[in-house]
Image: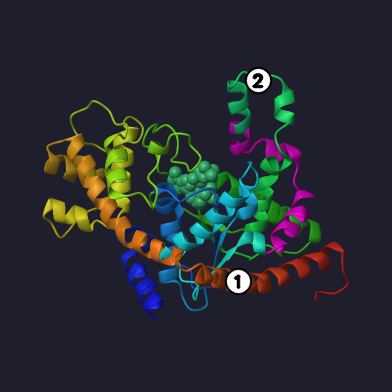
Amino acid sequence: MLRRARLHSVQCLSTYGRAQTIFRMQHTALAEKRVIVSGIQPTGVPHLGNYLGALKSWVELQNTAQPQDELYFFIVGLHALTVPQNPKTLFADRQNLMAALLAIGVDPLRCTLFQQDAVPEHAELMWYFACITSFGRLERMTTWKSKLATLHNGGNTDHVQASQLQLGLFAYPVLQAADILLYHPTHVPVGEDQAQHLELTRDIAEGFNRMVKKRYFPTPSTLHTPSKKILSLRNPAVKMSKSAPDANSRILLTDSPKNIQAKVRRAVTDADRFLSYDPEARPGVSNLINILSALDGGTLRRELGTTVLDTDPARLAETLHTATGGSGAKLKAILSESLIEALRPIQERYHDLLQDPTYLATIEKRGAERARERAHTTISQVRTMLGLQKETL
Ligand code: AQP
């Protein structure tokens, strides 16, 4: 009971204005049932990019869903295995991520929340898709190309090193297409970095439909949040990432107030003594304003002594410039306070949940059972269409 009440209060805290308005507009424009599907890798604690670029929108979509809508959110353990993992750490990361998703307000009673690796139909559908996806198409994926570039930058110009990269790393966008299409989604909320994978997903759906001569799989729309790409605090030329070597480049949802202040203070900006929003010319300072604009604004309104606040990043930059006299240090102080306040209730709930592994295991088990019901139907129909069985079971 207490847990339910806490969950509700976190959800209320997670309901933000700007993204919510966008999703509601998209929602009212579509009267039909929506099926929303998205996942996240258990490669560490989620950071601000994961949260503002994707996870916060999961909660938004859940809170604005109509009764007929279905939502599937999952942790993609199979994707984590595309790079070497320590089994003990991976197991803990999977569980911690489940706690983090509940802590930000994903409601396991409203959504099907599960571990992807507990639903073997994902891997089976991937195989069927792998048989209709060309090698050349996967070679053009930017994630693959950047892996090759990293190798070449390390001095390897021949193909020997490239040929030693794993098949899983090359083919994981096909698994991602299976993760998504298994549930026949209408919408997939992801950060901007996933746009190319979503294009591939739609192409695979169309390729399969052509092969079986019927419109079986949908071609889902990508939903980006307003803050679709949060940049590294140390190198604003690249996105904030869990696996970047410099821990100061990202703010984790679990970071202490002291850590948040230190990381924000060290964030790379520029020498200009004014504040403006110009992502091209001033990526560092624009990234900080973008983050601030994506938070709920309570702290900011208090700091600025106003009840009304336009959080459009360009106009917010003007307001901040006036309020701080163009001081980058003051911008950083306001951002730190806003982050500490926004993350506090999430962190409290997260630590509370980690004390109860039995509850987390129950949520995982129920979620996997519900997901498998839907996944089984898809796989059975696909097997029939492919000639692997006579009738859909
Ligand atoms: N910097 C970002 N800005 C906006 N959205 C982001 N996402 C990731 N980074 C940013 C979105 O978060 C969701 C979950 O991502 P993921 O963990 O499944 O994989 P990723 O995109 O590879 O994220 P990371 O943090 O960079 O992980 P590692 O380092 O392990 O590869 C996705 O919707 C993603 O778009």
Which percent across, then down, holds residue 330? 17, 40
Q: Residues within 10 Å of mark 1 (few under 14, many from 20)?
A: some
| Residue 312 visible in the picture | no
Residue at image point 29% right, 57% down: 342
Q: Left or right: 358 with respect to 317?
A: right
Could you say which quadrant of the image residue 237 lies in?
Answer: top left
Q: Left or right: 344 with respect to 158?
A: left
Residue carrying label 2: 156
Element under disc 2: loop
Residue at image point 63% right, 29% down: 148
Q: Residues within 10 Å of mark 2 (few under 14, many from 20)?
A: some
Quadrant into which the C terminus falls: bottom right
Q: Amino acid at mark 2?
A: Asn
Which percent across, then down, holds residue 122? 69, 60
Residue at image point 37% right, 68% down: 11
Q: Residue furthest bottom?
A: 1
Could you give the CA–CA distance between mark 1 and mark 2, rounded to whole angstroms?
45 Å
Q: Which of pointers 1 and 2 indicates the residue nearer the eye? A: 1
Taking the magenta stretch, the answer to whether it contains residue 346 is no
Residue carrying label 1: 365
Dominant SS in magenta: helix
Q: Left or right: 10 with respect to 42?
A: left
Element under disc 1: helix
Image color mode: rainbow
User: Which stretch is magenta?
Assistant: 119-146
Foreground residue among 179 and 78: 78
Q: Is residue 75 above or below residue 326?
A: below
Foreground residue among 172 and 214: 172
Which percent across, then down, holds residue 145? 62, 32
Quadrant into which the N terminus falls: bottom left
Q: Earlier in the sequence, mark 1 or mark 2?
A: 2
Could you say which quadrant of the image residue 379 lies in?
Answer: bottom right
